[in-house]
Amino acid sequence: MNKVPVEIFESPEDAVAKLAAETAELIRENDAAERPTVLGLATGGTPIRYYQELIRLHNELDLSFANVITFNLDEYAGLPREHKESYWQFMHDNLFDHIDIKEENIHIPSGTVAEEDIPAHCEEYEQAIIDAGGIDQQILGIGRTGHIGFNEPGSPQDSLTRAIHLDSITREDAAPAFGGIENVPTSAITMGCGTILSARRLVLLAWGEAKASIVKEAVQGPISDQVSASFLQNHPNAVFYLDEAAASAL
Ligand code: PGA
């Protein structure tokens, strides 16, 4: 019944151990071939354990990120980098400040470009991904709306990086961190579904029972722009890494 490969792990720790080992192998292979490694990264609660494991591999096994280039999925519109809920801040706190990545190799959409400059900013983001050789491995979470990145229901499969209005469910989920829904930005800049699907490998992570029903829709339901994670069914190298609770409705 699963229309996309699924791996179920006893715990999120087991899942991220496997994923981080895969990332480390990819980096080491590319380093040996003198090629950069291009990683697509995600924010939210889900990938934090993965970043902790990458930091451990850096500290304990000398895994170097000196030749790694990163592209993040998205950023809230209107938030400066130094805002505590900006994804720039999140990525530095949870990963970049703890590894040897070069600041110039980090790419995150800007939350503070003037509205009229957003289309050009998004085009530059797409071009930077192309110039880096495309994304080798893209990590994804899944929102309760089925979004990947901030591709809310209605996002076309071939959409590219752009500004998007955030769904009210997404804003509700972010409300505690912002101290109330009235403080949550109403829009964001996100890689599009087409941008994400261009990555050579996609790994969607989900933990906990609250994700079980939307995971089932994405994995077993029809491919639909109402659940942008369902587009992974069309990708030749996509996988869902789930803990038992997130897989419980499959
Ligand atoms: P979460 O968010 O990791 O905080 O659950 C996932 C998402 O909205 O993509």
Image: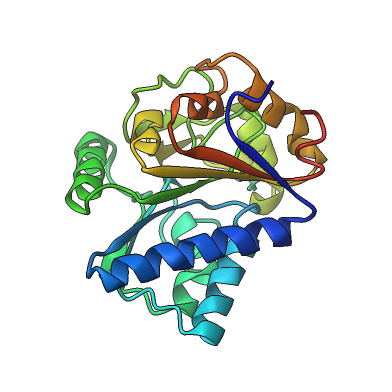
Residues 143 and 234: in front is 234
Quarter of the figure with residue 247: top right
Q: In this view, does 49 lie to the left or right of 157?
A: right
Q: Position of residue 77 (x, y in %)?
A: 42, 43
Residues 104 and 131: in front is 131
Q: Residue at x 40, y 22 (%)?
A: 157
Residue 77 visible in the shown view: no
Figure check: 171 above or below 177: above
Image quarter for ligand 1 = top right
Q: Which residue is drawn at 34% across and 51% down?
A: 110
Residues 118 and 92: in front is 92
Residue 202 visible in the shown view: yes
Q: Which residue is drawn at 82% across and 42% down?
A: 245
Q: Position of residue 175 (x, y in %)?
A: 68, 44
Where does the C terminus fall, quadrant-wise? top right
Q: Where is residue 29 in the image (x, y as percent from the top left)?
A: 35, 67
